[in-house]
Image (spheres, coloured by chain):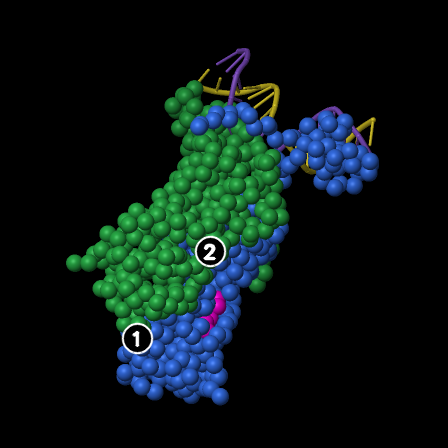
Chain colours: A green, B blue, C purple, D yellow
Amino acid sequence: MTTQSGSTTPRAATLTDVARLAGVSIATASKAINGRDQVKAETRLRVLEAAERLSFAPNALARGLLKGRTGTVGLLTSDLEGRFSIPVLMGAEDAFGAGRVSVFLCDARGDAIREQHHVRALLSRRVDGLIVVGSRTDPRPPLSADVPVPVVYAYAPSEDPSDVSITADNVGAGRLAVEHLLSCGRRRVAHVSGDPGYKAAQDRAAGAEAAVAAAGLELVGGQTFFGSWSEGWGRGAARMIVEQHGDVDAFFCGSDQIARGVLDALRELGRDVPGEVSVIGFDNWEVLTTNARPQLTSVDMNLERLGRVAAQRLFAAIDGTVRPGVEELPCRVVTRASTVPIS
Amino acid sequence: MTTQSGSTTPRAATLTDVARLAGVSIATASKAINGRDQVKAETRLRVLEAAERLSFAPNALARGLLKGRTGTVGLLTSDLEGRFSIPVLMGAEDAFGAGRVSVFLCDARGDAIREQHHVRALLSRRVDGLIVVGSRTDPRPPLSADVPVPVVYAYAPSEDPSDVSITADNVGAGRLAVEHLLSCGRRRVAHVSGDPGYKAAQDRAAGAEAAVAAAGLELVGGQTFFGSWSEGWGRGAARMIVEQHGDVDAFFCGSDQIARGVLDALRELGRDVPGEVSVIGFDNWEVLTTNARPQLTSVDMNLERLGRVAAQRLFAAIDGTVRPGVEELPCRVVTRASTVPIS
DNA sequence: CTGAAAGCGCTTACAG
DNA sequence: CTGAAAGCGCTTACAG
C-alpha cells in the first residue's frame, strides 16, 4: 500500500507563532527564549509556555545565517571501512555532540576528486571547521589552500607543517611494547610487522630498535621482519624465526592480526605462551585480542582520545587559537595473558 | 607557537559580491548561476566568471531557509562501535553523497535520552528526514511520534508497523546457509549460534531448521546450539558436537567468530575441512574469513545495500511516497575454501 | 532579458 | 521592559 502523505505534515512552529500565542512581539519572544535579561519574568514564562505548547524548535538555519556561525563541522574521512577512522570519528563526534555542534559526515573513499566535491558542499553549508581523518599515519596532501575555515588533520597528518595535525606516537609505541617485553624478563625479542610501505610500520620498528639498543640488546635476526598485516604472515614469520633463532623468547607484532598468526604457529610448534614466549600485538582490536589463546596483550593507540583532541583543537582554531604542527599522542599497553613476568 | 588568527580569514563571497563584479543585479546573478533560462548568454557568462573568480559558493543556509528544504538528513545510530551500523551507514552515505544531500551523523550510544536530544538538534537544523540505524534486528521503540519529517529504520526495525523499516532477511539467510551445505553433499548439519536473546539468532535457526526439514533431515542434536558470539564458544561447541555426534559433516555457524572457533577445534581434532566437514560462517567479516584456515565461506547480509535502500526509501518518503512496514532484504552466500562440493 | 521588492525565520541595536 | 525595523544571503513572482 502506497500512501501519498504530501502536505499532511504540519509546518514546524516559528517564532512568529510563539509570539502570537504569547501575545508579544517576536523580538520579545526571541529574547525570552534566548535567556536575555531585559524581559519581565512573567512575560518570559508566557513565552516559554507558548514555545512548549507548539514544540517550538528555533530554526538553526536562520540563526546561522544571522550569526555567521552555524555550529556545524565537517568530518571528512578517506575510508569509513578502515578500522582506524571509526574510533577517531567516534571520539570527535563525542566531543562535539557534548556541546551544541552537529557533525556532517563525508566519506571520500580515498578519492581526491570526491574529497574536493565534499569540501565544496560543506563550505556551501557554512561549516565552522573541518576535521580530515585519514586511515594511515603517512602524511597526506593538504586540502586546497583556499579553505576559509580552520582544518584539523587527524591520524593522517598534513604534509604542510603549518597545518594543525594530530596523530599517534608510533615510535613511542614501539618503544613501549619492547620495554613491556623486557620488563617481563625477556631478552630475545623478535619484531614481526606488516607492510614496510606504511610509515606506522617504520615508526614502530624504529621505536622497538631504540628500546632494545637502550637495553644493550638487539632484535632477534638483527632486523624487523616486515611482511603484510595478516595472520598468514604472522604464522609464517613465527615458524621461520623459531627455526632460525630457537632462543627467541618474545614477539612484538605490528598488528593484532599478525599476533594471532604468531600465537597459532607457536601453539602448533609446542612453544608455551606466556610460559616460554611472550607475545604482544598492536591495535588492541577487541575481537582479536580477547578471543586469542591466550588473550593477547596489545598496544592501544587511544584513537577515540585522538578524535576528541582533534575536536578540541578545532574548537580552539575556530576561536582563533592555532598551534600549527604535528601533535603526537601517546599510546598505551593493555596487558593480558600473553605476556606475564617471569616468576 | 600560538597564533591568533582572528579576522584573518576573508569573509566568504556572497551573491552581492558576484553581482557587483559582474555589473548586474543580484536577481540576475541568481538566475544566471542557477541556470534559469531568462538570462542572455553573454550576461550569464560574465556572472559565472565573476563567481569563479570569487570562489563563490552559494550559502546553503539562505537557500534552505527560503526553499523549506535543506538537502540534509540525519543518520542516527545507536552504536557506532558495533560493526553492523558502519556498513549500513556507508551505504546510506554513499546513496546520499551521490546526490546533493549532506548527512548529519549522530551516535546515541544506545541511550534514549541522548537519542531524543539528537533528534531535537537535527529538527532544529531542519533536516529533510531521518534514518535510524540499529545494531540488532530486534524491533526497537519508534522515535517519539511528533517528528515532523519522514523516518526510515534500518537494520533494527521499528516496533510500530506503520513506520518504514528495512532489515535483513535472517530467516532466509539461515535457509540459504543450510541449502548451501546440502548442495555440497552434506547431510549431518549442526547449527552453532550465539546469544539466543538476539532475534537474529532465532531467525537464522528457524531458517536452518526449515531447510533441513525440507530435505527430510533434522539438525544434528535435534536443535540449534545457542551460546555466545565468540570463538571460545565455537571451539567448545565443536568439541562437544564431534564427541557426541561423530557423524557430523557440516557446521552452520551464527557468526564468523563462532566459525573461527569451530575451525580451530576441528583442526585440533584432526577433522579435515573441507574434506570431511564443511563450515559456513555468518557476517562475511573479511578480516576473519580470509585469514581463516581454510578461508571461510560466509553469509553476507549486504548491509551496504541495506543502507542504500534505506536512503532510497527516505528519498521516496520525502517526496511523499511511503510504503509502511518491514522490508526484508535478502542475504547471500560468499563461497570460500571451507565448503566445497563432495567430488 | 533585467532589476526592484518581498520574504524565508531569526537576532540585535535602537527607540520608546 | 517592550516592540518596530533593519538585515543575514538568497529566490521568486512581478514589473518594466
x 54%, y 24%: residue? B7
Q: Amino acid at mark 1?
A: Ala
Region in magenta: B297-301
Image quadrant holding the N terminus of chain B, namely: top left
Is residue B125 shown to the viewer in this render?
A: no
Of residue B19 and residue A338, the one placed in the foreground of this image is A338
Q: Tell me the element at label 2.
A: loop
Are callouts 2 and 1 both on one chain?
no
Relative to A228, residue B49 above or below? above
Camera-nearest residue between A236 and A103: A236
Q: Nearer the viewer, residue A315 or A176?
A: A176
What's the residue type where badge 2 is placed? Answer: Pro
Pointer 1 indicates a residue of which chain? B
Image x and y of residue A178, in percent:
31, 52
Q: Residue at x 43, y 19 (%)?
A: A38
Numbered disc 2: what chain? A
Look at the picture and state if B142 lies above or below A265. above
Identified at 76% across, 27% down, the residue is: B23
Give me the disc on residue B198. Answer: none
Image x and y of residue B198, in percent: 36, 65
Name the residue beneath numbered marker 2: A196
Residue B184 in the image: above or below residue B150: below
Which secondary structure is most common in the magenta stretch? Answer: strand
Q: Label 2 vs label 1: CA separation?
A: 39 Å
- Left or right: A194, with B313 as reference point: left
**Mark 1, residues whose alpha carbon is within 10 Å: few (<14), some, or many (≥20)?**
many
Residue that mark 1 sits on: B237
Residue shown at the point (22%, 58%) measured from the top left = A340
Give whichever of A218, B342 is nearer the camera: A218
Q: Percent x, y for residue B83?
A: 42, 58
Q: Position of residue A91 (x, y in %)?
A: 40, 45
